[in-house]
Amino acid sequence: MNIKDLINIRVLQHDTNDQIRIGMAYPIIDLDKAEKDIVDNYEKKTAWCGGFKAACEKYYQRIAIVRADTLEVIRPIYPNK
């Protein structure tokens, strides 16, 4: 692990009621793994309504990984097009 490889991220969640929630900041090294972990977490939390994809279509406009300090989108996870 190299300290230079650390990125501090947050999860931005924009729901269909136009509410925006921004999670706590935490450090990651692997963006792909972080995205997989985030989706897996949503999958568990939304199992009651059909899982991640179903929940996104019903309840979210956007879910994205953002830089913790600037809130710049690093990677969209669920864009509503």
Image: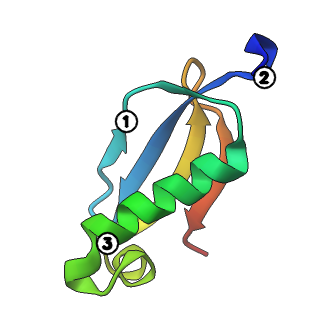
Q: Residue furthest top?
A: 3
Q: Splitting the image into 4 quarters, where does residue 71 fall? A: top right
Residue at (78, 22) in percent of width and height: 5
Image quadrant in which the C terminus is located: bottom right
Q: Separation of disc 2 and disc 3 at Cα?
A: 33 Å
Badge 2, how many Cα within 10 Å: few under 14, some, many 20+? Answer: few
Q: Is residue 58 above or below residue 72?
A: below
Q: Residue furthest front?
A: 1
Of circles 1 and 2, which is in front? 2
Q: Position of residue 41 (x, y in %)?
A: 38, 58
Question: Of callouts 1 and 2, which one flags the residue occurring earlier in the amino acid sequence?
Answer: 2
Pointer 1 residue:
23
Q: Separation of disc 1 and disc 2 at Cα?
A: 21 Å
Q: Separation of disc 1 and disc 3 at Cα?
A: 17 Å
Question: Of callouts 1 and 3, which one flags the residue occurring earlier in the amino acid sequence?
Answer: 1
Q: Position of residue 12 (x, y in %)?
A: 46, 44
Pointer 2 residue:
5
Q: Position of residue 76 (x, y in %)?
A: 64, 56
Residue at (29, 50) in percent of width and height: 19
Type of amino acid at the residue the image marks with label 2: Asp
Of circles 2 and 3, which is in front? 2
Type of amino acid at the residue the image marks with label 3: Tyr
Q: Is residue 1 left or right of residue 51?
A: right
Pointer 3 residue:
59
